[in-house]
Amino acid sequence: MERAEEVSAAAGNGSARRPSTAPSARVSIWESVRACGVWRKEVDKAELRRQVVMPLHLRRAVAAAVKAKDEAAGVAAAAAAAEDTAEGEGEAPAVAPVVVFVNSRSGGRHGPELKVRLHELITEEQVFDLSIAKPSDFVHYGLSCLERLAEQGDNCAKVTREKMRIVVAGGDGTVGWVLGCLSDLYKMKREPVPPTGIIPLGTGNDLARSFGWGGSFPFGWRSAVKRYLSKAATGPICRLDSWQTVIQMPEGEIKELPYALKKVEPSDRLEISQENGTELHEKASFYKGVFYNYLSIGMDAQVAYGFHHLRDEKPYLAQGPVANKLIYAGYSCTQGWFCTPCTASPQLRGLKNILRLYIKKANCSEWEQVQMPSSVRSLVILNLYNYGSGRHPWGDLKPEYLEKRGFVEAHSDDGLVEIFGLKEGWHASFVMAELIKAKHIAQAAAIKFEMRGGQWDRAYVQMDGEPWKQPLFQDQSTILEINKVPYHSLMINGEQ
């Protein structure tokens, strides 16, 4: 079952189909071998450059604007490069200009080598290292520079801005970061928003799997990079729901804030309240973030939190997806998921002790409380079909079951998320092995968690692989509310 439907590649012609998704994570090795290109036609480098490389004056302008964080610096760079265009590629716009963001910390640390290869293929100016340049700088200065040049009569800049496409080389968290920055274009009324393709460098790569980009970085990656870029230039565009999370704490702050979350300034509180109809208390602390794949609370987020700290403290241990998954497995065994210590009651591990769940169903404005099963130790809010490195815990549900539970078939642009639970580690293991289904709890158009500490002074939460430690209070509730963002993110379908 595929969840993303194609929208038109540029003009919205209304045709639609579902991109294929790998049936499970067990095909990751096959995906890596297939991506080497043994059975595929080689991409011609000259033709690729004609498709994706921007004219010299424009790529220098964008690079200069991002580096200086000043669109005027880009305009000046474009003027300075004008004389060189006669000696270079000329002024013809690219068929589908592509800009690549590389996260050198993702997955197996392939980032630095990949960056060099991309420089060879599409020039240095169209490749941005996320450790140096933020995607928000590209949106606010790089694209603004193209828009300024277009206003000054540069038709090549106008066409380039309209046809721009983005590729993210990284994991799910990196892709979400870039998508979040691109979504600012909607708020600033600076459409069109460039669609995004993926080179999977992360551990799980569930966003990449869901849109046909594969679940792992291929063995023969030097040749495969050309095919990634070619697919990014020619692939049809799909829609993806995104979900805003607002956290309201009675006091205190979240330490070690992940990229996925930002503290809400007092001046922005009214806007959030009006958007979501959320009641915001004056003295509380607020945080907001957006997820595209999943949000989870409980043991799986605790394991992810431990893994991220280990990777930061001892980066030499995280040498690739296989090593990362072994570390994840080790943390699962040591955090009490498989075996709760005898000194603690197993019931204390259940989320029911600290959490109340409320949902709004489609076309309904009233909150409805949903009873939490006492055995659930991890609660997952899922937007995509893939989770946990290509597993399908929600499953392919039969029409009779859907009707009985009041569910509908899940898609990534249907305005709904699926809520399921994982019990102890053995149950989670069988779910991830796809021997059984997860504990189906609900489908919802909006979600609210009310959390109180009780025996706990903290909970672990993660959004799209970015975990944090959430402080809890015994006498006051922490509210976590999830609502759909009113516009779609645009993804490039890599299944070709």
Image (spheres, rainbow, N blue to C red):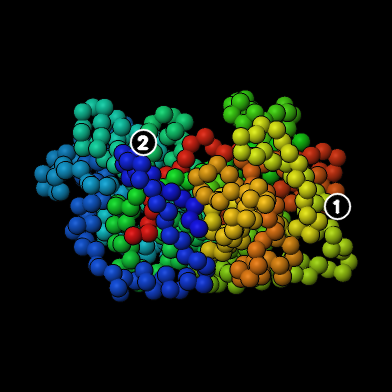
Three-letter residue code for mark 2: Pro
Percent from the top left, x then y, of residue 67? 37, 42
Q: Secondary structure at mark 1?
A: loop
- Place residue 186 in its image quadrant: top left
- Residue 81 image label: none
From the image, which quarter does the C terminus lie in?
bottom left
Percent from the top left, x then y, of residue 158? 25, 34
Q: Is residue 201 left or right of residue 373?
A: left
- Looking at this view, is 286 or 17 the one in front? 17
Three-letter residue code for mark 1: Gln
Percent from the top left, x then y, of residue 7? 38, 44
Percent from the top left, x then y, of residue 459? 74, 51
Q: Is residue 281 left or right of residue 485?
A: right
Q: Secondary structure at mark 2?
A: loop
Q: Is residue 201 left or right of residue 399?
A: left
Q: Is residue 309 left or right of residue 167?
A: right
Mark 1 or 2: in front is 2
* Mark closest to the chain's N terminus, 1 or 2: 2
Residue under the image location 55 percent in, 72 percent down: 323
- Looking at this view, is 175 or 399 the one in front? 399
Q: Which residue is mark 2?
A: 192
Query: Label 1, label 2: how many angstroms apart (C-alpha)?
Result: 50 Å
Q: Residues within 10 Å of mark 2 (few under 14, many from 20)?
A: few
- Place residue 262 in its image quadrant: top right
Q: Residue furthest left?
A: 86
Residue under the image location 55 percent in, 41 percent down: 415
Q: Which residue is mark 1?
A: 455
- Looking at this view, is 384 or 53 the one in front? 384
